[in-house]
Each structure stands twice: as C-alpha cells, then as structure tokens.
Amino acid sequence: KGATFHYSTPAVQLVLDDSGRCTGVIAKNESEEYIKYNAAKGVLLTTGDMAADREMMEHYNVTLGKIIRYNINTNDTGDGQKMGIWIGADMDEFACGDLWPFAAVMMDGTLPTTFDGTHFYAGVANLPMLMVDGAGRRLMAENLPFQSPSIPKLTCTPDGCAWTIWDSAWESKVPQGGYMVEDYTASNTQEEVDKNVANGVTFKFDTIEELGKHCGFDKDIFAASFKRYNDLCAGGKDLDFYKDPLWMTAIDTPPFYASKHCSSMTSTRGGLKNDERCRVLDKKGLPIPGLYAAGNTAGSFYGNVYPPNVMGSGIGHGQCFAWLAVKDILGMDFIHANI
Ligand SMILES: Cc1cc2nc3c(=O)[nH]c(=O)nc-3n(C[C@H](O)[C@H](O)[C@H](O)COP(=O)(O)OP(=O)(O)OC[C@H]3O[C@@H](n4cnc5c(N)ncnc54)[C@H](O)[C@@H]3O)c2cc1C
C-alpha cells in the first residue's frame, strides 16, 4: 500500500516540538549522514529489547549478568528505550530474561564448540534427574517447567551454572514420552551421551566419588546430597522439593554421568512504560504526545517474569500491541479495534 522501508538507517534520536510533542526521529544512514523524518501523526518505537547492551541489561536485572549463552538479535541494543529515556520517558524498574535453562557449558565456563543452532542442550542433561550446584548441593525440583530451572542457577549459584547427574540405566527409568524426553534442543539418546563424553561436554566415571571429585564438588556436601536423593527415591517421595514421583528414580547403576549447564537467554522483557493505548508515559505517568512503543521496547506488561505458561507471548505481544498502537495513531477507536 505504498509504505517505504528504509533499511540500514537506525533511529538515533527523537525530535520534540516546543510543546513537548514527539514530531519525528533522526536516523543515520549507511553514509553516516543524519536524516530527519517528520511524523505528522506519531512515532512508534519498536526497536526490540536490550539484550545486546549488556550494561543496560545488568542495570535492570543484575542476575542476567550471569547468563553465559545469548541467543540474541545483536541489533537489539535498547535504542528505543534509550531514545525514550533521553526525552523524559519512564522505564520499567526491572527487566526479566526469556530464559532457556539447560544450555551445555564446558568445565571452564566456556560454551562447547561442538553444538550449533538451537541444538545446545547436552543429551539427557536437560531431563529432570539430580541437579546440584558447583558445591554438590541439590538445588530444586528438577522437573519444574521451562525457564524455572534457571532461577536457582541465576539467584543461588555463584557462576550461574549447575550440574545434572544420571546413571547408565537412565533409559529404562525415565518416563517414556514424558516431559522433554525428546525435543529440538537436545537429542536424548545414549548415542548422544556417548558423543558428548567424547567431546568433553559430559563426564563419565565408574564411581560417584570419582565423578564428584572430577566435577569439583565438595566431598561431604555432594556425598550427603547424593545419599539423601537416593534415599528419597527409595521412599518414592521427594520430601525436600516435591519433584514429580515419576522422576524420583535412584541413581545407582555405574558408570555415572554428569554434565554442566548454564542458562541461555533469547531476549529481555522490560521497557518504556506505556498506557493501554501504547502511549509512552513520562515520569509523572502522563502520555508523551505523539510517542508510542510496542513489542519488547515497551514495558508495563511482563513485570519481573516472562511467563512460561503463556506460549508465544513474545511474538504475540509485539504483533498485537504494535497493531493497537497503529490503530490509535491513525485515530481509530483502540477499544473496538476489530478485536
Ligand atoms: C532464538 C529466539 C527464540 C525465540 N522464540 C520465541 C518463541 O518461541 N515465541 C515467542 O513468542 N517469542 C520468541 N522469541 C522472542 C521474540 O522473537 C521477540 O519477543 C519478538 O521478536 C520481539 O519483537 P519486537 O518487534 O519487539 O523486536 P524484534 O523482533 O527484536 O525487532 C526489533 C527490530 O528493530 C531493529 N532495530 C534495533 N535498533 C534499531 C534502531 N535504532 N533503529 C531502527 N531499527 C532498529 C532490530 O534490528 C530489529 O529488526 C524468541 C527470540 C529469540 C532470539
């Protein structure tokens, strides 16, 4: 319908008139020239999140500084949020990450070079077996869904990492067709485990003591955690964390395996405060005339958590609220906007 797209021309600054209305944006083209775009009706900021600006991200959520694996859009440097802040817009006080909890990490904290794309979980290490911190202490009900296993790692462990421990009889013990037995992030097969052992991503030892020593766990803490876990499994009830009993299977068949994992992140959530019409708000809570935000540039939506039980809310939020913002910019009734 005649729209023109100006690629490689990032917006750098908003333009305000004397009344404080946002009347345009200044952008920079590939020849490093600044171009001013006048906006008769309004400016909608949709420059995405701020995951590629580490300083900004850590400012809004210090625990995200522990993220080791970033699966991010490297253009998302929080430009829209910054441009808004510079003209007096208010910003969410807190950002959260869209987290993926089981990204494989090498012993020294670096990422394996043997994985690529979305295949970055070590086989079986993403299943809810026994999960301990670097001292060998059990951390949580390992079967909590989606990003929940990231939370103890990011808030309780010094390096943001944890270990999964399992045994050679895992295949006969895990619920078939159960939670994450096979997904696109990991191939949960013995073949994959063997491959990872060869690659140094997973460790295999004949005794649990040797394994614990190799992983650097505290001998006594790990011995106590391991015994307690197997005792609870024998009783069929997780009296410490209440993991689903289906996954309370003893780790008793040598050789034993361990794999270290960290949290990975796709994007941050948290942005410019805005009202029900997507109008960006100033520090008094009043709309800045002519300025809108949507998608991950916009705040006032997630609070401090990206909810695991609302699938597609990242893309859904971006598409839906950008559409509503445009309706409002065009003067259409936002409440009855053909929903
Ligand atoms: C690996 C991965 C997997 C994901 N999986 C899911 C999923 O399964 N479901 C889901 O709902 N969400 C998922 N998400 C999140 C989802 O992609 C984002 O929430 C959504 O894309 C956000 O949309 P947006 O328009 O706000 O920002 P983006 O899609 O990030 O778009 C922002 C755009 O603005 C551009 N830009 C940045 N700065 C400027 C500037 N100064 N001037 C002009 N342009 C600029 C960027 O280049 C980018 O093209 C995933 C994200 C990743 C990275």
Image: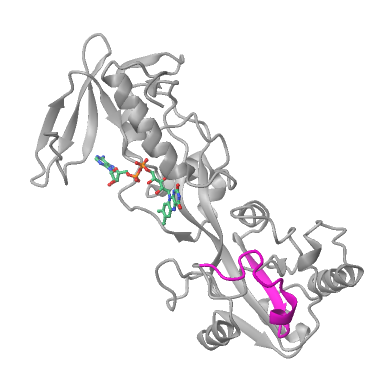
Which quadrant of the structure image shows residue 236?
Answer: bottom right
Which quadrant of the structure image shows residue 131?
Answer: bottom right
150 or 109, nearer to the observer:
150
45 vs 181: above or below: above
232 vs 209: above or below: above
Q: Give the side of residue 262 with respect to residue 1, left or right.
A: right
Can you give x and y, in whole percent of width and height, for residue 2 in the image? 11, 34
Residue at image location 64% in from the left, 69% down from the top:
177
- Membership of 257 in magenta stretch: no
336 or 197, nearer to the observer:
336
Q: Is residue 116 visible?
A: yes
Can you give x and y, in whole percent of width and height, for residue 21 in the image? 26, 14
- Residue sitting at the far bottom: 206
In the rendered image, which quarter contains the C terminus? top left
Residue at image location 88% in from the left, 58% down from the top:
239
318 or 259, nearer to the observer:
318
Residue at image location 12% in from the left, 42% down from the top:
29
Can you give x and y, in whole percent of width and height, for residue 135 in the image? 72, 68
Please report the bounds of the magenta region as a residue range: 162-183
- Residue sitting at the far right: 235
Q: Is residue 86 visible?
A: no
Colour scheme shown: one colour
In the rendered image, which quarter contains the N terminus? top left
- Residue sitting at the far top: 19
Which quadrant of the structure image shows residue 223?
Answer: bottom right
- Residue sitting at the far front: 338
Residue at image location 78% in from the left, 66% down from the top:
246
Q: Give the side of residue 28 with respect to residue 42, left or right.
A: left
